[in-house]
Image: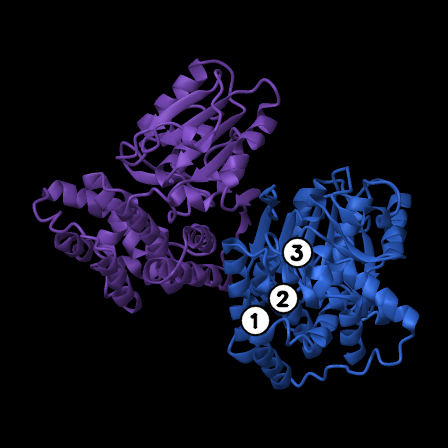
Chain colours: A blue, B purple
Amino acid sequence: MVAPIKNFLSVPKTMFGVGAISQLNELLDERRAGSGHIVFFVDHYFKDLEKYNIRVDSGDLFFQVDTSEEPKTVVIDEYTKKIKDSGDLPCAVVAFGGGSVLDVGKAVSIMLTNDGSSSDYQGWDLPKNKPVYKVGIPTVSGTGAEVSRTCVLMGPEKKQGINSNFSLYDQIVLDPNLLETVPTEQAFYTAMDCYIHSVESLCGCYLNDFSKAYAEKALDLTRKRFLGDGTHGDMMIASMFGGNSIVYSEVGVCHAMSYGLSYAFGIHHGEGNVIAFDYLDQYYPDYMEEFREMVKKHNITIRRGLCADLSEEMLEKMIDITLLMEKPLENALGTDWRNIFTRDVIKELYLRM
Amino acid sequence: MVAPIKNFLSVPKTMFGVGAISQLNELLDERRAGSGHIVFFVDHYFKDLEKYNIRVDSGDLFFQVDTSEEPKTVVIDEYTKKIKDSGDLPCAVVAFGGGSVLDVGKAVSIMLTNDGSSSDYQGWDLPKNKPVYKVGIPTVSGTGAEVSRTCVLMGPEKKQGINSNFSLYDQIVLDPNLLETVPTEQAFYTAMDCYIHSVESLCGCYLNDFSKAYAEKALDLTRKRFLGDGTHGDMMIASMFGGNSIVYSEVGVCHAMSYGLSYAFGIHHGEGNVIAFDYLDQYYPDYMEEFREMVKKHNITIRRGLCADLSEEMLEKMIDITLLMEKPLENALGTDWRNIFTRDVIKELYLRM
């Protein structure tokens, strides 16, 4: 039996351009329609939204999101409780930040209309009720979270996404100017998320012409940004294209390894990818030279020697988490992946990182 | 005053892949929900839909669309009347064919819920009522009609699109296998529509990073299809990318001239573009060599000497139609375009075609 061809959902509305953020108040006023209030999630890097003239009304809720760690299900549940306890449902959830903040916005918009804990919904197509309308405003580019139908959360037992059409933003505002103040390392690690999942998409067996076109152009634009004369706008589009590429394909070995690193060390996904990718010559040989050229050109020091002293127990847990990534591993290595990517192989790779 | 940045609407659902058409019955059954009927518009090139196992039920309406000419507002109005006279509104309009058929599906879906003649809605954002749900299934690639918010109609007085969010398909099904039986010339002319509007987008002053990325990749893929080893799938994606490119940019001189050729001779838009482009070295010098290489490789004989014997009156009308394309001409030539692209310049160009 052939797998059905996905009928994929796009973000319905996109506003792209330098200065687009100046149109946000107007967009939100349409949603408020006089009486509604809005919940803002803002990366703690931005103290407030005044610099961008974004209006936060007295009835609105404003949460500063600590993005030093990746979003946790317990934190999502706390936000949800606070919002529910404060009164009526908001007319919109606005997320302003990087991939973590975008994922918080997605998860909370779903949990406001679906009972229980967000950890109950980690998996595929589990939320049943339509979420609160949400607007995503990326301030660093690469994750693809602005166009993807997942929000990846660290649960008590696993790191896994809420994969659902309900995770998709209703509106995204892409303003290249927002990327101007991102620290170099963070911009680099996040962009490499795009670079690496585009490579994984191109090298995987799930690839079709749709995913190929998006991944190839995402690579071109990322390359242009970090080895040529690319703009912030180019990287913003690269991120969107990289995210679209995954619609019909999957990530691969690197993402599967990165998840284990995030679990053990709380390392951000982008940095985890960079750490892992540097040891995956065997799987992605054609891209290593270029990747290392970008690392070198931007003076990135990849953390090393992380896993040597880990307990056996933690290593086994990291291997468990890696092996949970069944589709990415099948995409990367074929249906026989379990016999190729054994616990021993994974362990040996982790021990080198 | 700076022009506002567009908040553009995407086709909400896309199904891409070889064999995707086999999933259409299931999609439509969801819409029928037991009792609804469907209106099919099918390119006259396909006698019926049996070859693709698409079920047409006894209550459905089936129209064979004569695509030897481009869609006219009077024809749209006739279709609309027939459907309205036959009873309840359909639960879906399905268009199966090239750009003309896709435009017929768009226009009829709008006219079923908006009074008057389709010629009343040629322009920008004129329809007021939500259209009937519609599915677009392209069988030849290049126009971008599958993702665009316009449907171009030949009216009694002008060739112009119904430019509206309501023109956007709710669902598109992109199956590269459908392109297999397209005659070479038609495939070529339609693909060149994509090539040419991508060139016009890249060379225009409206260009931003979004439109640039889409146009560059659309060119790459079209080039690959006609000068390399590209697949039908590549061309299907090129068409979608070319259409997306226009979201934030515009077409240019060639489209403006092509409209006049269509008006005078009923020439299809794609062929009109090819005829006109071959005389536009001055405006698009960087792309002429490649364009002519594609023409040569595929043994395309461009019609020539069309306009030499036209009446003064017809030539003046063609110039009027060209000059109606204000945005494309501004995009191509800057705000001073009226002083550059004068009636004399346009006339001289037409007389060479």
Residue corresponding to mark 2: A194
Percent position of residue A106, x then y: 75, 51
**Mark 2 surroundings: few (<14), some (14-19) or many (≥20) residues within 10 A:** many
Sequence-wise, which precedes: disc 2 or disc 1?
2
Circles 2 and 1 in contact, beta carbons < 8 Å: yes
Above or below, comparing residue A286 to residue B22 in the picture: below
Q: Are marks 1 and 3 in contact (CB under 8 Å)?
A: no
Q: Is residue A293 left or right of residue B44?
A: right
Chain identity of mark 2: A
Estimate the spatial distance between the alpha carbons at disc 2 and disc 3, rounded to whole Å: 25 Å
First-in-chain label (2 vs 3): 2
- Tell me the residue that label 1 is attached to: A222
The three-letter amino acid code for the residue at tag 3 is Thr
Indicate the position of residue B329 as horizontal and vertical percent values.
32, 56
User: Based on the displayed image, in which of its 4 quarters is residue A64 positioned?
Assistant: bottom right
Horizontal side, residue B291 vs residue B245: left or right:
left
Disc number lying in front (2 or 3): 3
- CA separation, marks 1 and 3? 31 Å
Residue at figure coordinates x 44%, y 14% from the top left: B86
Q: Position of residue A277 (x, y in %)?
A: 68, 74
* Nearer to the camera, B50 or A218: B50
The residue singled out by tag 3 in the image is A335
